[in-house]
Amino acid sequence: MTLDIITDDLLAGTPHGFFTRRGGASSGVFAGLNCGFGSSDQHDIVAINRARVAAAMGLQDDALIGVHQIHSPDVVTVNAPTSDKPKADALVTATPGVALSVLTADCQPVLFADAANGVIGAAHAGWKGAVGGVLENTIAAMEDLGATRETIKAVIGPTISQRNYEVGPEYFDNVMAEDDSAARFFANGRDGKFQFDLPGYGLHRLRSAGIADAAWTRHCTYADVDRFYSYRRSVHAQEADYGRLIAAITLPNGATI
């Protein structure tokens, strides 16, 4: 099956993709393109899925670089292909021939590109990472490689939408304790709960950091079971595990997307 890859015009000219679950080799609850070695899916099958992603970008398997995600604000700089996966939640590079990737299953995958200066970035931004500053830290790390905020563009890929992201009052308290500007991203829900606008909050953080060209693809991971994995949906369905979506970006160097 052909891979289903979402791209955005903001990043046109920089090969990138938010890969859906379609076109993979996994089965069962992981059916499709599960790219997470941290899942209980078969390791060899996940490797096949990741190889398909690399091939779709015109790169070798070892050029698809990721990190051990921990919901942190930490960023690593990639200078060459590596199998190391340091604990962090974002990557940046100015090196052609590598693809930066992050895994998600409701959290925000955010891809960054400064085409004018040849610098890219990728971030995994759940609420903890976003509140903690992972997006701003990614931008700063890109600047260290020669990017400028005026020329960086950023796109948030498929993530859970406000309609499907119900949270308790303790969640509201935790977010507000770290960022008192976040109240407008909470709507009143049922039984004293709230609905949190994660992509809206992500866009707010990006624009407040000086990224004028920022967008969300407007795909909800929870709502579309055929295209996306969702951690929260798997919990509600009482499934044993869930797949991980991958988003990737590379500098233009013969890549195909």
Image (cartoon, rainbow, N blue to C red):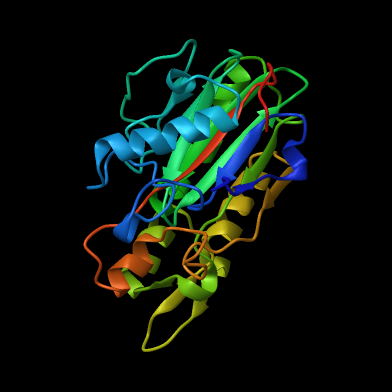
Q: Residue furthest bottom?
A: 191
Which residue is more in the foreground, 235 or 198? 235
Q: Is residue 23 above or below residue 94?
A: below
Residue 140 can be seen, yes or no: yes
Residue 246 in percent (x, y) is at 47, 42
Determine the residue positioned at 76% across, 41% down: 10
Residue 173 in percent (x, y) is at 36, 66
Which residue is more in the foreground, 56 or 117? 56
Which residue is more in the foreground, 16 or 185? 16
Residue 142 in percent (x, y) is at 59, 23
Q: Count the numbered circles shown.
A: 0
Q: Is residue 232 above or below residue 152?
A: below
Residue 73 can be seen, yes or no: no
Residue 193 in percent (x, y) is at 39, 80
Give the position of the C terminus as an image quadrant.
Answer: top right
Determine the residue positioned at 50% across, 38% down: 123
Rendering quarter of residue 248: top right
Which residue is more in the foreground, 162 or 10? 10
Q: Residue furthest front?
A: 1
